[in-house]
Image: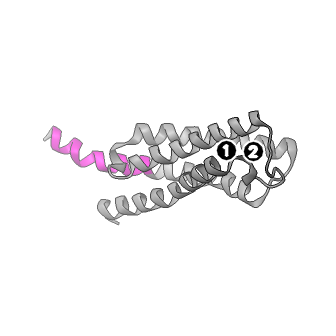
Amino acid sequence: MDLATERRLLQAAVAAACLVPLAMGALSLALGPAILRGIGAGAPIDLDSHFRYLSGLLLGVGLVFASCIPAIERNSGRFRTMGFVIVAGGLGRLLSLVDEGIPGSGHLFGLAMELGVVPALMLWQRRLAAAAARPALRQAQG
């Protein structure tokens, strides 16, 4: 596969993956903790505040990942940093699973994204960035 095709495929995969934090961040900001199974309306104010704060962070993460898409091969630092943030959150979710039990399917989907899809995208982006840098390096040396 040529570099341009691989670049477009990675861009499409990241764009699709960005839909999760963008949609859930926006929806969770709007609805608050009532979006969670078993919470309902009337959650404690501190829980609502913290939940919406974290939802705003999730939305922000999605926006930063989306900002990497146009020049995906040149945004390694930003992409890697956001990826590590997501993996750290996934490890927290995994700790909850071990300590408290198996959550609902939406949270299991999140766990798969955080500890499976995002690390895979990070590796793919790293490989693409290295491949894209090789011709530039040869040209600079020549």
Q: Quadrant of the N terminus?
A: bottom left
Q: Is label 1 in contact with label 2 (beta carbons under 8 Å)?
A: yes
Spatial CA span between label 1 and label 2: 6 Å
Give the color scheme: rainbow, by chain, secondary structure or one colour: one colour
**Residue occupying image coordinates x 73% and y 44%:** 93
Q: Residues within 10 Å of mark 2 (few under 14, many from 20)?
A: many
* Kind of element beneath mark 2: helix
Q: Is residue 16 above or below residue 99?
A: below
Outermost right residue: 100
Q: Is residue 104 above or below residue 49?
A: below
Q: Quadrant of the C terminus?
A: top left
The quadrant where residue 90 appears = top right
| Residue that numbered label 2 is attached to | 94
| Residue that numbered label 1 is attached to | 90
Q: Residue 115's x, y, as percent? A: 64, 49
Q: Is residue 60 above or below residue 1?
A: above
* Kind of element beneath mark 1: helix
Look at the magenta stretch and give its main secondary structure: helix
The amino acid sitting under disc 1 is: Gly
The amino acid sitting under disc 2 is: Leu
Outermost top residue: 46
The magenta segment = 125-140
**Residue occupying image coordinates x 61% and y 42%:** 87
Instruction: Check residue 111 in the rendering and tell me which mark sits there, or answer none.
Output: none
**Residue 2 lies in the magenta stretch:** no
The residue closer to the viewer here, 82 or 137, is 82
**Residue occupying image coordinates x 16% and y 39%:** 140
**Residue 131 lies in the magenta stretch:** yes
